[in-house]
Image: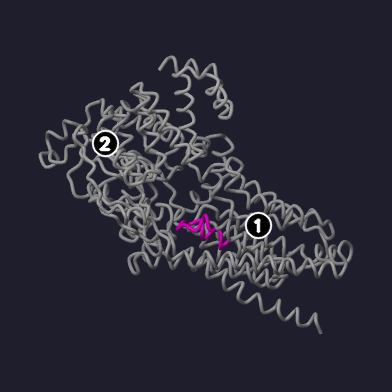
Amino acid sequence: MVFKVVNKIIEFLKIPIFFILFAYLALWAYANLGGSDYLFHIKAGEYIVTHNSVPSEDVFSFTMEGKKWVDHEWLYQVLIHSLYKGSGLEGLFLLKVMIFSLAFFILSLVILKTDWIFGFPLIFYGLQISTRRFILRPDNFSFLFLILFLLPFIFKKRKLLFVLPLIQILWVNMHGFFFFGPAILGIYLLAKKIRPDNQNNDFYNTAKIVFLLTLGACFISPHPIAAITYPFKILLDIFSGNQKIFYESIQELQSPLKHISRSYLFIGYLIFAVVYLSFYKNTNFFLLILSGVMALFCLNSMRNLYFFVPLGIAIFADRHKYVKDFFSTRLLKEKGFILLQWSFVIFSIILSINLFQRVKKIPKSGRSYITKDNKLEVKSLFLSQDPRVFPKNIINFINNNELPQRMFNNFNLGAPLIFSSFPKRKVFIDGRSELYGKEFFSLYRNILKRDKKSIDYILDKYKIEGFMISYFRNKTPTSLIKAIHKRGFKCVYFGTDGIIFVDKGFLSRTPSLKKHLVNFRTVKFKKIDLINEIKLNRPSIEGYSKKAYILHMLDYSNTSRRYLDEILRINPNHAGSHYILAKIYYKGNDYQKAFIHCRRSLVIDRSFTKAKNLLARIYVKTGNNDSARELLDKLKIDFDNFLEEVKNE
């Protein structure tokens, strides 16, 4: 009787627990579109619809104009363009919610069919891994399609196999990860060859036919040969080292092993998979091989981590009965297993309470900004664009003023520029790393590092007459800005989201632009009177801080210091501003004030590595070498080399 009541309670609990899970999923997906790539995809979709054809060469940049380009995401681009045209941002948010809701609904069915009590923590942490990729990207569809391809093998339903070729047709036209479709079927057939059995012969024979149909489906695209060879080309580039420069420069492409603090949940998933697969009884060679392949794929870059979640849940569904049998009969016995079961129920309730607390905060969460008119704006990210992704002030200036057609722009400004200015304006570079290639991206990086030959090269080859640099969300390329300024380019826009320089010859030919000419000596930071409101809403003042840093790097230290004084009046605990002040005083040999501001920045942010490095320099300059050595040891910097570097400043 007691056990019946207990089981009824457990059965009832799954309803509110999974409801909270999906409420959290939906609200999180509505909270932010994330990234800026979707801006490019909308414009590419518009181009395809307008011209009624998929481009086979680049049309969006002037540096790669006419170069062969495989648009393997064309169907996705048409879809989001149509949604944006018909429903605006709300349609795009709805698409994202639908993709992830369907994906996790299917995964939840697997958990519920297997054992929801032990499976809920798995799907909970799988959601935590996946929310980091809740951005509007075509790989969201790859995530969903991967789940659909695993379903026939999870539920062992032969009829589901016949749906896979149809899914493959969509996949090959939506994202480059389509190779996983035939790969999953191929691995299953290989596993059966390694360990044949007499079970599921009908399933196996059907899988062979579906494998051939799925391979054939890969050729159903506007450019079939190019689409098929694309993933192999990318793999070849990775193994040959041609992709190394992108993996070093773009954080989402870096290995999760370099960012353990952000990938510990994925590591937990790997450990879980190893533990479950280690139960040797009726070893599933298909899942064993597939999990090894998927682990290597995910370890290749941060953006791939969530692709292991469906496989982890497939392993749970396949191996759980053996694990459960081992714990309930051999290790814990019946009473011990019931105790373990209830500990998981309590743990799931705790996780749900945690989710519910977060659910209440999501719609209210937002960011506070100081606008160009020095007014406070609190902008929710719920059903809205993140201002950090779309720097509207610099974009509006570009579109409303007569600027040169051929201008350098930095990487993250490419997609917003294409979205807002194409076809009137083409870009220098955007996020399509496979199009630009290793050599051009290496050139781009050298330009950011102020390499004279690289800057001379683009000025001559591409007839560059200006530079557009967005820095609100990005690391500020101060070295390049300084080089541009020294070469005589004139600043016509200096905002909190970016800076624009034009050639002085172009400026002399464009009278309408002269009124925007910026004099760095007289740049003013207007005083803000909303101090109480500012303190309550804690606005982002990163843009102003970056302006101050640029002024300092351009040797306008007095103007920079005025900016920083005003920033610290608004927010005395802004570590970056204290650091810049410390650099200004250090450069002026006022080591006492440099020390004070450097220490303040570290009190506010103890992990501020640049401030630690500067503090070590101050110690050396003031003869406190012991403290410098102690600090440098923690930073793993050689003291003698550092000492020589400081002496040669």
Amino acid type at circle 2 is Arg
Tell me, what colour scheme is on the image?
one colour
How many neighbours does mark 2 have within 10 angstroms: few (below 14), some (14-19), or many (20 or more)?
some
Q: Is residue 371 above or below residue 595?
A: below
Q: Secondary structure at mark 2?
A: helix
Q: Residue furthest bottom?
A: 1
In magenta, the rendered stretch is 131-145
Task: Identify the amino acid type marked 1.
Answer: Ile
Viewer-proximal residue, 597 or 388? 597
| Residue occupying the far left of the picture | 511
Q: Which residue is drawn at the image coordinates 57% and 51% (left, top)?
A: 304
Image point 57% across, 25% down: which residue?
Answer: 630
- Please say whether residue 429 is one of the residues in the magenta stretch: no
Of labels 1 and 2, earlier in sequence is 1
Identify the residue position indicated by label 2 in the image: 562
In the image shown, does 628 or 291 lie closer to the viewer?
A: 628
Percent of width and height locating residue 10: 71, 76
Q: Nearer the viewer, mark 1 or mark 2?
A: 2
Q: From the viewer's side, name the closer residue of 75 and 525.
A: 525
Pointer 1: what residue? Answer: 184
Q: Nearer the viewer, residue 619 or 20?
A: 619
Q: Counting other residues with Cα less than 10 Å from the Cα at mark 1, is it few (<14), some (14-19), or many (20 or more)?
A: many
The spot of residue 423 in percent (x, y) is: 27, 50
Observer able to see residue 46 = yes
